[in-house]
Every structure is written in structure tokens, then in C-alpha cells.
Image (cartoon, rainbow, N blue to C red):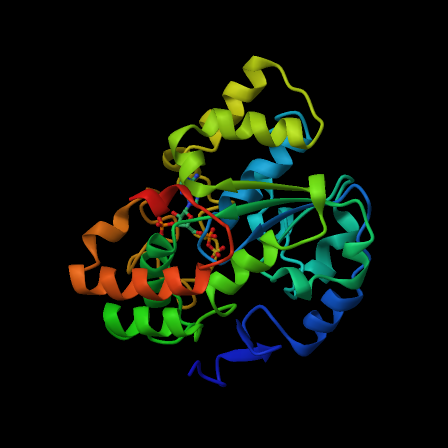
Amino acid sequence: MASEELYLFYHGLPVPKIAHTEESLKNLETFKVKDDDVFGVTYPKSGTTWMQEIIPLLLNGGDLTPVEGIPNWDRVPWLEETRISLVVDKLKSPRAMVTHMPYHLMPASFYSSKAKVIYIARNPKDIVVSSFFFHQMASFLDDPGTFEEFLDKFLAGQVLFGKWTDHVKSWRDTDLGDRVLYITYEELIQDLRGGLERMLRFLGRQMSDDALDRITEHCLFKNMKDNKMSNYSLVSQDLMDNNKSPFLRKGIAGDWKNHFSPELEAKFNAVIREEMEGSGIMFPWDEE
Ligand code: PPS
């Protein structure tokens, strides 16, 4: 089970104490969502940091100033984290925020609002790999043990924000209608510009081809990796040791193939398939 020293348990979901307190989680519940708010919603390691780069640029017409001047955690804060109370009043409308919360744990005011959601899903096999390395570099997370041990914890939901399957299912079974756009990390890897155009349309915005080209270039992994406002190099090495594993680590789809044995793959597939059965949800990686 996840350590009580390092984590709080919010409705049974482990959340790291470094960024969450009883108070920040209370604030989440009473947070006043505005109709023009935009939320990037992710299970951890699915593309949150990417959304913290993309959404402000789509909303502001491609002006790079905020993404080059404000750290990602203050530019597009997490709804559930402590930082939000320090920056929320400074956010320009339309406000952009991110959250790892499952659908049913959103603030009460969210459901009756018109706020929009971009939900990014990622192949859970790549999530486990990304998370495994994150646990090695972040001192505020528990030691992941061997890859196989960590994979077992992931499948049991004894990891940050619980089970991946619960998260993706919760966000598919909603009353949000056209307030939500579903997109995958893998689609963005394959065609970032196309993904940005979809998001732009969804947000009801327009942009010149030149501006869209500029954003696309800026949000490529190789360029974001060099943005110190987004690569976590501003965090002290005691907390996040980029020498052990960089936060922006590989930025690819399919790295799991370098870490899963055939036995682990079979075990993983069986659990995920059983839990997704009957949900009607198909992901691009289900074909693999
Ligand atoms: S967290 O801790 O939940 O906020 O992490 P999150 O940002 O959701 O996920 C981190 C992974 O996203 C990758 N990433 C990117 N991939 C491709 N292109 C861009 N621009 C990009 N930005 C972040 C990051 O590298 C982590 O994945 P891995 O597989 O570990 O490289």
C-alpha cells in the first residue's frame, strides 16, 4: 500500500503530500468554476505538462510570453494542489487549469457550469514506464521497487490517483456532451498540428497558420525539454533529480516495449481488458 508518510488519501486515492493538503482538497470541493474555464484532465503521466503548454497558447493566440515566463504549475495550476490558491486570482480569463481528479470528484460548481474539458488519455503501458522513472527521480514519491513490483501496484491501483481504468471510465461516462474533447497522447505524437487544430476548433478559437506553426514547433518534445519553465529544472535537485531521470524523459509512444517482458505484457493486458470490458471504450493502442 502507498505510504502514509508521503501521501494523503482523498476518497481512497493516494495524492502526494508535497503538493496536496487537507485544505487544498477542501478548496477543490468549493472551487468556483467559471463558464469560460478550460480544464486539461489527465491521469498522471498522460500529458499534463504538455497541456499546460498547449492550452494557454491556444487561448492567447500563440503569444509565447506566459509559457516562457511562468512555471507550468503557476501558469496552468492543478485544481487540487496547494499552489492554486496563490495564483488563481492572477489567472486571466479564460482560465486554464489541469486536474488529475476522476469525474465524480470535480468541484460541485463544475457540473452545472459550461466549462470545457480536454481529456488526454495515454497508453497505460507507457504510463507505468513513465511513472516508474518519475518515482525514481522524485524524492517525495515512494521507491517504486523493481519494474515488476511497480507494475503490480499500478494494476492494483496502489499508485497516485488510483486505477487508470477507473479514471478513463469515469471521464467517458459523463453528462458533459460537447463540453468535452477526447484526444490521446499518441494522436498528438503522430500529428501535433492536427491535434492542436482539433483543440482550437473545440475551444471555438481561430489562429493564423503562422501562429499555429509556431505553437506546434514550440510544443514539440525537443523544444519543451529546453523550456526551463516547463522541464522542472527550477525545482531543487533534492526533490526532483533530473540526473536520475529527466522529468521530460523520452516523450515517445511505445517505450513500454523496452520494459515489458512477454509475461508482464500478458498479465497487464488481461487485467486491463477485464476492467475495460463492457465499457465500449476503444483506444488506438488496443489494436496493437
Ligand atoms: S505529471 O507528473 O502527471 O504531471 O506528468 P505528465 O506531464 O502528465 O506526463 C509526463 C510525460 O509526458 C511527456 N511529455 C511529452 N511528450 C511528448 N511531447 C511533449 N511535448 C511532452 N511533454 C511532456 C513526458 O516526457 C513524460 O513522458 P515520458 O514517457 O516519461 O517521457
Q: Is residue 262 left or right of residue 277?
A: left
Tally the numbered discs: 0
Front position in the image: 3 or 140: 3
What residue is rendered at 73% in x and 44% in y? 95
Percent position (x, y) of residue 82? Answer: 65, 66
Quarter in which the N terminus is drawn = bottom left
Q: Is residue 89 left or right of residue 123?
A: right
Q: Is residue 22 shown above or below 209?
A: below
Q: Is residue 30 left or right of residue 58?
A: right
What residue is rendered at 64% in x and 75% in y? 21
Percent position (x, y) of residue 204? Answer: 71, 27
Quarter in which the C terminus is drawn = top left
Task: Residue 115: name its quadrant.
Answer: top right
Residue reaching furthest to the top: 209
Residue reaching furthest to the left: 262
Q: Is residue 197 shown above or below 259?
A: above
Q: Is residue 144 visible?
A: no
Percent position (x, y) of residue 57? Answer: 61, 32
Front position in the image: 177 or 219: 177
What residue is rendered at 33% in x and 49% in y? 249
Q: Is residue 159 shown above or below 287?
A: below
Percent position (x, y) of residue 183? Answer: 52, 40
Q: Is residue 69 left or right of residue 37?
A: left
Q: Is residue 174 visible?
A: yes
Q: Is residue 48 shown above or below 277?
A: above
Residue reaching furthest to the front: 278
Front position in the image: 154 or 133: 154
What residue is rendered at 31% in x and 64% in y? 270
